[in-house]
Image (spheres, helix red, strand yellow):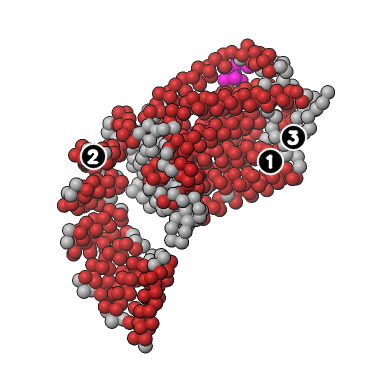
Amino acid sequence: MTTSSSSSLPSSNLLSNDPPEAADSAARTGERSAAEPTASVAQSWTWYLLGLLFLIAVAWWLYARSLDYDLIFDDLPTIVGNESIHQLFPLFGDEGSFGPLNPKPSTPVTARPLVSLAFAVNYHFGGENPWGYRLFHIALHVATAALLWAIVAFTLKQPRLVERFGSIRHAIAFVAALLWMVHPCHSETLIYLTQRTELMMGFFYLLTIYLSLLYWQSNSLVGRTIWLILATVACTSGMMCKEMMASVPAMVLLYEWTFMPGTTRDHIKRSWPLYVGLALSWIPIAWLYTSGYTTPLAGFNNTISAVDWWMTQANAFFVYWKMTFVPYPLVLHHQVPTLTSMSEAWPGVLGLVIYGAVTAWLLIKRRASGYVLIWFFAVLSPTLIVPLPLEEISDRRLYVPLAAVTPLLVALVFGWWGKFTDVARDSFPSRPIAAAGKLLSNYWVPVGVFAITIFVSSMVTARTMPRLSSRQIVWKEVLKHEPDNMYAMMCQGCVEFNDGDHEQGLAKMRRSFEARPDMKMGVISYATALENRGYRKRIIDVYREAIRVSPTEPMLRYNLAFWLEQSGKTGQAIEAYQACLEYAPQDAAAHTNLGSLLAEMGQLPAAIEHFEAAVKIEPDFSSCMNLMTAYLQNGQSEQAAVAAEKLLVAARSEGKHDVANRIERSLVALKAKSR
């Protein structure tokens, strides 16, 4: 009888009939049992291929109808208005411009260059047609489900679990992957194109886990080195897709502690190179953030205090658990009241403390349920900790957390039934059809339960997907479930205004503003609409009211100053710019505008101070020109010559070559005059 050689890949036998002892040995050594025939291996791959084709078919049946859905909400600035992705090469952009790996600031992909590159590839081949973008999403979703299948199957053959689940591990893994794939909360991640950040991060998250498993399973130095490099690359790639990837090195470590045989010392000795490699993947994300490439609206210097955010998120955390089992309502935006006192927040805070204590105890005991609980929290932790106003809860954030919860639920039900009926230790025939028949015979209740659950989940997904089909429908659907959601009211008003229904749109934006003058995006959108309709006098009142509610928001103060300037109220504009600079001293535009107003009033020394500050912050052509002109007007020829040199550099860097030549000639005269 021919036997297969050892392999660094996990066994793929969908319905393995290995006895527990053989499976236990395979889990420890990373080799197949020597008694496993080649024909059985071929049948295993046949089953795996059929399962993969089934996943593809189900995903296509569910999501193919969404291929032609419109671009919605942030898809417009992310794709249509994002010049960074409109040209595939050069990857970092031309001189003075942006590129796929040098994204435009203040977009959803600013700190996520790999996602930006993926969008650039789609744009290169298909422009703004959403078909190709969503086809990629469906393919990546299936690939992530296949990874989940492989990870769960590998996990269930470990010594702690193999006796109970070894004979049906691939059946459990396949059901878990399928159930996860059709969960209704994932429709937002696949259809809303901007959420490619979540989709790609999820793929690399599971890929990092899977490659780590292959590292542990490999018995050769060469094999381990290869898997180590690939795991590090996958982890780094995920970090460049979304910040929620940051927890994966810790989750790999906790996986080894929970599921793999050996002591902590054994784990360190075996895996320290892996953990060093994964930890190095934090460097790119740290560099991105320290370089100013951050997620728009996120951060501690925000309209909501950190303590209020944490209290709110303590309660929101359990809403995510509720959405896991009861995904309703499925809307693009959830209105969540900010909790500002412990008397309001104590149920969630207490619940989170208990959750943490239970999780810690289960982890110490090396229980699989402890790993699932910490996974759920760890993946969500970046958004639980870092304030992101108006996005307290998002369905799409469950994309990766559910990848741990779903397998646990499936394994518990199959395990309970096997123990209840005493069929867990039954062996399965080698013939695939006979093995499948015995599985259905022995586990007909779990199979039936999950067949119904998968069918219902698929139907819910299919029925609720049209809510994301167009920008005209998205916010109507939110308002249907949450009529007092003022963010949705503002967005729906913007949609109607842009579609030509100006008065109806303005009415919705006004209602939103009056209810939530603290909502910066709503304030700016309402003011922009008023400007469009020529109601400029009302704009100043809008900004004054917004500043009364949010006095530390520099953008509101800057916009108020700008409109006061446009209205000819120079004195008030100067005061407003000065107030803006108290909260944002590095705002180059505020320094420039204030300097210009002071220069117009003949206060050249004060104007020069602000022009100098603007050049120091942002030495572009306009700032340098203002400074040089002010120096000349104030009779400071020597300083004007220095400013002209900076102006020459700025002109060349911005491609103003003809202007640069004229400046160069003028600079000679300036230097001569200053002697």
User: Can you give x and y, in whole percent of width and height, for residue 335 in the image?
Assistant: 33, 36
Q: Earlier in the sequence, mark 2 or mark 3?
A: 3
User: Can you give x and y, in whole percent of width and height, for residue 23 in the image?
Assistant: 73, 26
Residue at which label 1 appears? 215
Which residue of the protein is positioned furthest toward the right in this rendering?
1
Mark 2: give few (<14), some (14-19) or many (20+) Cα within 10 Å.
few
Mark 3: give few (<14), some (14-19) or many (20+) Cα within 10 Å.
few
Instruction: Please tell me the numbered disc located at residue 670.
Output: none
Q: Which residues are magenta?
A: 413-419
Foreground of the two, 502 or 203? 502
Q: Amino acid at mark 3?
A: Ser
Q: Is residue 220 above or below residue 173?
A: below
Q: CA distance from mark 2 to mark 3?
A: 64 Å
Instruction: Please tell me the numbered disc located at residue 7.
Output: 3
Q: Earlier in the sequence, mark 2 or mark 1?
A: 1
Label total for image: 3
The residue that appears at 30% across and 31% down in the rendered structure is: 476
Foreground of the two, 662 or 594? 662
Quadrant including the C terminus: bottom left
User: Is 40 included in the stretch rendered in magenta?
Assistant: no
Residue at which label 2 appears? 500
The residue that appears at 23% across and 70% down in the rendered structure is: 598
Query: Is any part of residue 346 visible from this angle?
Result: no
Query: Is any part of residue 464 visible from this angle?
Result: yes
Secondary structure at badge 2 equals loop
**Number of the front mark, 2 or 3:** 2
Q: Is residue 138 above or below residue 645?
A: above
User: Is 415 included in the stretch rendered in magenta?
Assistant: yes
Which residue of the protein is positioned furthest toward the bottom in this rendering?
675
User: Can you give x and y, in whole percent of width and height, for residue 470 in the image?
Assistant: 35, 34
Quadrant including the N terminus: top right
